[in-house]
Image (tube, rainbow, N blue to C red):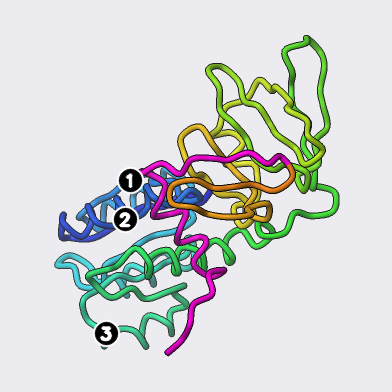
């Protein structure tokens, strides 16, 4: 999970970025502020991995802010003016988003940040390709290979992990814990109660995902649909005219 803050002197710009961040599973929004000086203070109080930073602000420009933090956090610049792009990249920003920022363009920048800040996330290390989960039986831990997980179903006080071997393992966990632990490049949240391995998708039909091995279907909730389809966008083949 990437901890981020938004610094912009316009509230409507903050509101749009807040919406985009909340639709992105691997981003955790800590704070927003219209004052870059307050933003500097936040960096001393919290671990901030990524800053969405406006360029033109009255008390301090975004470029001056970057120089002041001296590489402490990664930065994605946000602005309505393209002429600052070169100066931004000279100061090693991860991306440069032109306002108004569409979600499709935002998620591209966010994924770039993920690959830079958490470079091991897309491919689990050999020694880190499995998890142990607590079961209802006291003192019992079950090992599950991440590559075997087809989907996870959230129930009232626990989850059910469905594997390609046909197992349904009940674990004393919640969906948020698993979503943060599993590699973001390989898993997608489609519903408040469902998290699936994208490699096991057989078919997407409207608001339903059909899965391999288990033969089951998983719903796509309205809240998660846009983020999910953006994750799938790179895999969708279309006829280029």
Q: Which residues are magenta?
A: 214-241
Rendered image quadrant of residue 114? bottom right
- Residue, disc 2: 6
Q: Are marks 1 and 2 in contact (CB under 8 Å)?
A: yes
Residue at screen point 75% across, 38% down: 163
User: The C terminus is located in which quarter?
Assistant: bottom left
Residue at screen point 34% across, 63% down: 103
Q: Nearer the viewer, mark 1 or mark 3?
A: 3
Residue 21 location (% of width, % of height) = 37, 52
The disc, 2 or 3, on the residue closer to the chain's N-terminal end is: 2
Q: Height in image: 76 above or below 19?
A: below
The disc, 1 or 3, on the residue closer to the chain's N-terminal end is: 1
- Residue, disc 1: 31
Q: Is residue 215 magenta?
A: yes
- Residue, disc 3: 82
Rendered image quadrant of residue 175? top right
């Amino acid at each position: 999970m990437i901890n981020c803050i938004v610094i912009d002197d316009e509230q409507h710009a903050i509101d749009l970025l807040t919406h985009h961040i909340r639709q992105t599973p691997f981003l955790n929004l800590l704070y927003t502020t219209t004052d870059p000086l307050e933003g500097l203070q936040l960096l001393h109080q919290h671990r901030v991995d990524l800053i969405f930073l406006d360029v033109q602000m009255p008390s301090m420009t975004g470029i001056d802010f970057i120089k002041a933090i001296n590489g402490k956090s990664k930065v994605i610049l946000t602005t309505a003016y393209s002429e600052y792009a070169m100066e931004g990249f000279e100061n090693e920003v991860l991306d440069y988003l032109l306002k108004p920022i569409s979600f499709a363009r935002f998620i591209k920048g966010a994924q770039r940040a993920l690959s830079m800040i958490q470079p091991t996330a897309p491919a689990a290390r050999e020694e880190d390709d499995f998890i142990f989960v607590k079961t209802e039986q006291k003192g019992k831990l079950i090992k599950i290979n991440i590559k075997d997980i087809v989907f996870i179903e959230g129930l009232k006080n626990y989850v059910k992990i469905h594997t390609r071997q046909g197992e349904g393992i009940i674990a004393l966990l919640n969906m948020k814990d698993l979503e943060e632990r599993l590699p973001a490049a390989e898993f997608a949240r489609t519903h408040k109660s469902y998290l699936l391995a994208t490699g096991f998708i057989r078919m997407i039909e409207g608001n339903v995902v059909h899965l391999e091995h288990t033969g089951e279907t998983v719903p796509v909730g309205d809240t998660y649909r846009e983020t999910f389809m953006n994750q799938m966008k790179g895999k969708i083949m279309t006829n280029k005219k």
